[in-house]
Amino acid sequence: MKLFFDSFWRALAYCLHPRVILLSFLPLILMVGVALGLGFFYWEPALQWIRAVLESSPLFNQIWGWLDAMGVGRFKVVAGPLIVVIAVTPVIVVCSLLLVAVLMTPALVQLVARNRYPHLERKQGGSMVVGILWSLGSTALALAALVVSSPLWLVPPLILVLPPLIWGWLTYRVMVFDALADHASKAERRVIFRRHRGWLLTIGVVSGYLGAVPSLVWASGVLFATMFVILVPVAIWIYTLVFAFASLWFSHYCLAALHALRAEAVVASSKTDSVSPWFSVCTNAVHLDSDAQI
């Protein structure tokens, strides 16, 4: 638990580092460009399709009539945009996570390693190709889990639990690999995954809940149409900062765990070396005593 909170506060402090803030603008520029471009070409067609589906549904017509009777019929106007936002939010989250992992995490890991563990040996246990395949495989599993679990989101408590758990698992899988890829060997990475799985998954889940904050800003852009162009980039930047914070948190935790693991190996090796001569002396004494008896 000490390592969990220590790495948390260190990551929080590092988020104020000028280099971290500057690095966060690169994923932001890419994501905003893509989001605004896709929105320019596909926003209206998507809204028209959603509205056509809603208007042709007898169930939703009954819901609209019930909302009109309750005096909140205006919700029908924003229902279409909200559905589109809810549908594209997972894509925005996944793209933000992967962009941070590719464009920011290597630099953040080097920043942490240079400041705290300048002499930590780099064993290059994970190549870029393996990292990309690991991230894509984890992302595919997370998206499949989102699709399979989406009907359960209609149960009020589960919508507050399932998405953060899935995002947390994905963040944990991607960020831990990237944090250890340069410095840890494959064997060391497996040991850290096994020993610290619970705490690392907790960091991922906390990051998943923090990732819900930008969704509120993203959705409010629909309710306040005049602020949409401003609020959407702000939401994407918050996504970037949340995942940058998660990357720093994992980097501090994983590098500290790796440093401790190697220190344990050194201590174990020194104990073995100190026992070996004594064991050799005892063995020789036994052999000499046996020879004397013979």
Image: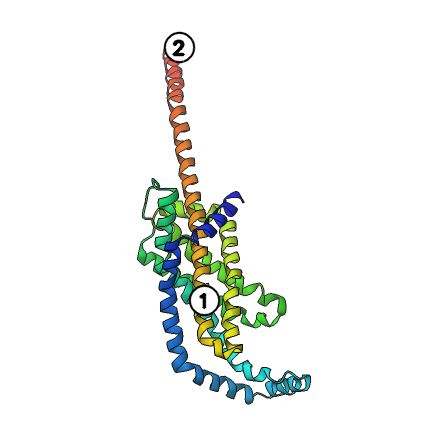
For residue 184, say whether it is visible.
no
Q: Is residue 276 above or below residue 48?
A: above
In three-dimensional space, the C-alpha distance between marks 2 and 1, rounded to whole angstroms, equals 78 Å
Callout 2: helix, strand or loop? helix
Instruction: Please name the amino acid that badge 2 sits on.
Output: Gln
Q: Give the camera-side residue of 126 and 111.
A: 111
For residue 55, say whether it is visible.
yes
The residue mark sitting in front, 2 or 1, is: 1
Spot occupied by residue 103 in the image (x, y as percentages of width and height)? 35, 60
- Colour theme: rainbow
Give the labeled residue for mark 2: 293
Q: Is residue 217 above or below residue 119?
A: below
Give the labeled residue for mark 1: 93
State the image quarter where residue 266 is shown.
top left
Spot occupied by residue 280 in the image (x, y as percentages of width and height)? 37, 21
Spot occupied by residue 113 in the image (x, y as percentages of width and height)? 37, 46
- Looking at the rendered image, the quarter that the N terminus falls into is top right
Left or right: where 169 falls relative to 115: right
State the image quarter where residue 116 is shown.
top left
**Residue at the image position 41 percent from the left and 45 percent from the top:** 255
Instruction: Please name the amino acid that badge 1 sits on.
Output: Val
**Residue at the image position 37 percent from the left and 44 percent from the top:** 115
